[in-house]
Amino acid sequence: MKLKIPRTNLQSQLIKIRDRKVTEKHLLNEINNIFTRIQKEDEAVLKEIHHGNRADDNGFDPDLLETSRIFHLDHIYRLCVDYRLRFLDSVLFKADVPYEALIEIKDLEKAHGTSLRGFKIVAPSKAFKLRNADDPLLFAPIGNGYYYLIHKWVNDLNPFRKLLMWPFKTLENFIFLLLISSFLTALLIPEGMFSREQTSTEFFMLFFFVFKWFAGLSIFYGFKMGKNFSTEIWNSKYYNA
């Protein structure tokens, strides 16, 4: 009869080694200390994001930066204008910041040996706590107008958003939209409505009146709702400016 030697269970052996060194109470205390330290680190990062002060640069180590994440203010401006987004201080951001972003920040701070400040976020207006002018891309500043992209957690934008927001980029774009809309509307008006035979002069007079009507409605709506063009609001903290 062969003698069967039990196989070694590595997990059991590891538990035995651990139990010789530390008690269960000591182990739990150590775990609690780790979780407490992590929680304090997370709270410090969140406090800086939601209540921190502005900063123009951070103590990044240039050799550790990924060039694919470095963007100049001009690049961010172009993105915000094209898609009608805001580039504002993170203290105005009202949505939750995902835990993945906190991990990215802490990893960067550890790698670069610094505490990051002056966070800014690119997002649609509705994602911010905007003020009344009458009274998700997370960035940290590098310096000299450059910003480092830390984390992206928002869903991708509607593929037609850039096209839909094109008329609101500048005054010139909006006027062009009014002209095209007025011309098409004038074409849809039956010829016999004002005269038996419509001449070119009468058509352009009709087009002019339609244009004035559209422009008047647009101006009224714009003033009433406090709307402005993307080139003016991309970094404004006011909802009606």
Image (tube, rainbow, N blue to C red):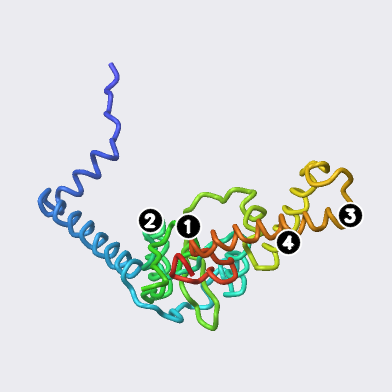
Label 1 near label 2: C-beta < 8 Å? yes
Whichever of labels 2 and 1 marks the residue nearer the N terminus, that label is 2
Q: Which residue is label 4 attached to?
A: 176
Q: Position of residue 62 (x, y in %)?
A: 53, 78
At label 1, the amino acid type is: Pro
Secondary structure state at the residue bearing disc 2 = loop
The three-letter amino acid code for the residue at tag 3 is: Ser
Q: Which amino acid does label 4 sit on?
A: Phe
Percent coordinates x, y for residue 151 in the rendering: 47, 60
Q: Which residue is at a point 12% across and 48% down the rendered structure image?
A: 24
Camera-nearest residue between 226 and 100: 226
Q: In this view, does 101 lie above or below 44?
A: above
Front position in the image: 28 or 219: 219
Residue annotated with mark 1: 136
Q: Do the residues labelled 3 and 2 touch (CB within 8 Å)?
A: no
Q: What separation in Å lies between label 3 and label 1 (alpha carbons)?
A: 51 Å
